[in-house]
Amino acid sequence: MTSPALRRPPRRVCLGSIDDFPPGQVHQVGAQGTMLIVAQVADGEFCGVRDECPHLLLPLAGGALDGTQITCPHHASVFDMCTGDNRDWVRVRSGLPLPRWTRRLLDRGKSPPGLTVVPVIVEDGKLYAEL
């Protein structure tokens, strides 16, 4: 196990100009071998997460964005892109909507996992991710 004192500090990676990330759109970007999705969720406020839904590790790119919330395009789970919080877990299976009681049964009493948040920083008109 790595000691906290031995962990490397986060590395800042440029994702591009902030003009490349218009508001209200989800953008898939690769950074140092890691796929991310980034969105400008409000004027000048950016959020980023690893591009994988914790349900089956499928990509979130292509999911619908509503404010800070992204819906997984595969099973309709809803997550907050800024906090990583799971807002609604696996709402669809095989194309059919699942009732809430069925979803709770599938969870087996566990709290559904959230997303891995990646800090994004705006500096001098550029967007950076800390990996």
Image (tube, rainbow, N blue to C red):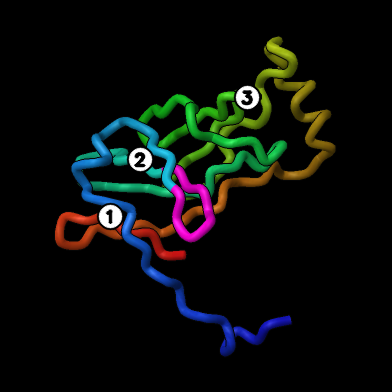
**Disc assigned to residue 39:** 2
Q: How far from the left and from the top, in percent, is residue 69?
A: 44, 34
Query: Which residue bears the numbered disc 1?
Result: 127
Task: Check the image and report above or below for 85 versus 102.
Answer: below
Q: Quadrant of residue 38?
A: top left
What's the CA distance linking mark 3 and mark 1? 28 Å
The amino acid pointed to by label 2 is: Ala
Label 3 crowd (10 A; few <14 / some 14-19 / many >=20): many
Image quadrant where residue 56 sits: top right
> Where's residue 72, x and y in %?
56, 29
- Ranked by sequence position, the earlier of labels 3 and 1 is 3
The one of 126 and 90 positioned closer to us in this rendering = 126
Q: Amino acid at mark 3?
A: His
**Amino acid type, residue under disc 1 in the picture:** Leu
State the extent of the magenta-drawn residues as a range: 30-37
Residue sitting farthest toward the top: 96
Residue at image coords 52%, 81%: 8
Q: Residues within 10 Å of mark 1 (few under 14, many from 20)?
A: many
